[in-house]
């Protein structure tokens, strides 16, 4: 199992990172809003993650709002040269905590500027344009704005988030797509729909990512397994004296060398458990059994 992955491998400035990152979405308060319940622990989680070899962080200005960016800067600035801080744009939050599109070209530019300012950076290394299924914004227009900012030097690499295979194929025709971030876990591999939102599945775009050498970054990678699947995960967990969450992460790492999991947590003990999952070597029989 490969322990590293390269982003934008064919570009002039590829980025190689360790294959277990950290997603900051769980650091703010309830509903991904407001300050963390324990600010000291939140800062310690970030420092411990990076100190343990995590060099890929996922964040955005609409977590909090802007809480995770400020925590990252307080905990880690000046940033280690090997650290990649990945951002998302294309959405914003209302005071009622709802998630709404914020993806007109001028709004995308405002988000980029805000992320750079809050984090104290001159360039975003990787930024995902998050597709909001209920938005009329054409993908070509939004990505055009992203590529404009890439040419200006504000963005190093452009990625896509929450995309269908058709949208990813369209994006590839518009420019270099460095990464894709979709929902993916052992139990939730395909598109998940609710009355208010649609999360596109990782399994649906994995083949296309592999064909083009594009890292796929699973979000919500610790989504709880369905009851019938949890039995299998629990059985394998007992074999390795591990937790089901650790087996879920290990499964992602073994599923494809192009997966870069970013499990998030707001508890330091769980962070340490998650990091240990990288040391679990699932056998081919384990993978066949899990499916």
Image: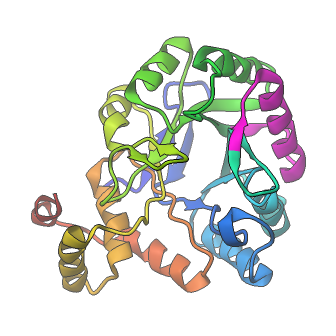
Magenta region includes residue 133: no
Looking at the rendered image, the quarter that the C terminus falls into is bottom left
Residue 174 percent coordinates (x, y): 55, 13
Nearest the viewer among 77 and 228 is 228
Q: Please indicate, yes or no, whether residue 282 appears anywhere in the rendered image.
A: yes
Looking at the rendered image, the quarter that the N terminus falls into is bottom left
- Compared to residue 204, the image places residue 266 above or below, namely below
Residue 93 percent coordinates (x, y): 76, 49
Residue 144 percent coordinates (x, y): 68, 16
Residue 222 percent coordinates (x, y): 43, 66
**Relative to 126, 280 lies left or right:** left
The residues colored magenta run 100-125
**Relative to 202, 264 lies left or right:** right
Nearest the viewer among 151 and 15 is 151
Number of numbered discs: 0
Q: Please indicate, yes or no, whether residue 5 appears anywhere in the rendered image.
A: no
Residue beneath the point at 42% across and 20% down: 169
Nearest the viewer among 254 and 36 is 36
**Relative to 56, 288 lies left or right:** left
């Amino acid at each position: 199992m490969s322990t590293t992955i390269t982003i934008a491998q064919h570009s002039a400035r590829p980025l190689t990172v360790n294959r277990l990152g950290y997603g900051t979405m769980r650091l703010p308060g309830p509903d991904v809003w407001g300050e963390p319940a324990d600010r000291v622990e939140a800062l310690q989680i970030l420092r411990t993650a990076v100190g343990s070899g995590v060099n890929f962080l996922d964040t955005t200005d609409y977590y909090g709002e802007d809480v995770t960016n400020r925590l990252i800067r307080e905990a880690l600035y000046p940033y280690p040269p090997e650290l990649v801080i990945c951002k998302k744009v294309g959405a914003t939050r209302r005071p009622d905590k709802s998630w709404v599109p914020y993806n007109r070209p001028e709004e995308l530019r405002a988000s980029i500027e805000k992320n750079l300012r809050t984090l104290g950076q001159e360039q975003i290394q990787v930024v995902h344009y998050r597709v909001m299924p209920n938005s009329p914004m054409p993908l070509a227009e939004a990505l055009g704005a992203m590529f404009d900012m890439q040419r200006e030097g504000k963005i190093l690499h452009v990625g896509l988030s929450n995309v269908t295979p058709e949208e990813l194929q369209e994006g590839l025709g518009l420019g270099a797509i460095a990464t894709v971030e979709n929902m993916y876990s052992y139990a939730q591999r395909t598109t998940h729909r609710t009355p208010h939102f649609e999360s596109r599945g990782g399994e649906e775009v994995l083949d296309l990512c592999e064909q083009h050498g594009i890292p796929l970054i699973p979000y919500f990678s610790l989504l709880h397994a369905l009851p019938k699947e949890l039995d299998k995960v629990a059985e394998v967990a007992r074999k390795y004296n591990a937790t089901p969450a650790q087996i879920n992460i290990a499964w992602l790492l073994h599923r494809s060398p192009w997966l870069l999991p970013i499990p998030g947590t707001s508890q330091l003990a769980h962070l340490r458990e998650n990091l240990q999952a990288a040391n679990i070597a699932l056998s081919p029989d384990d993978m066949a059994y899990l499916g």
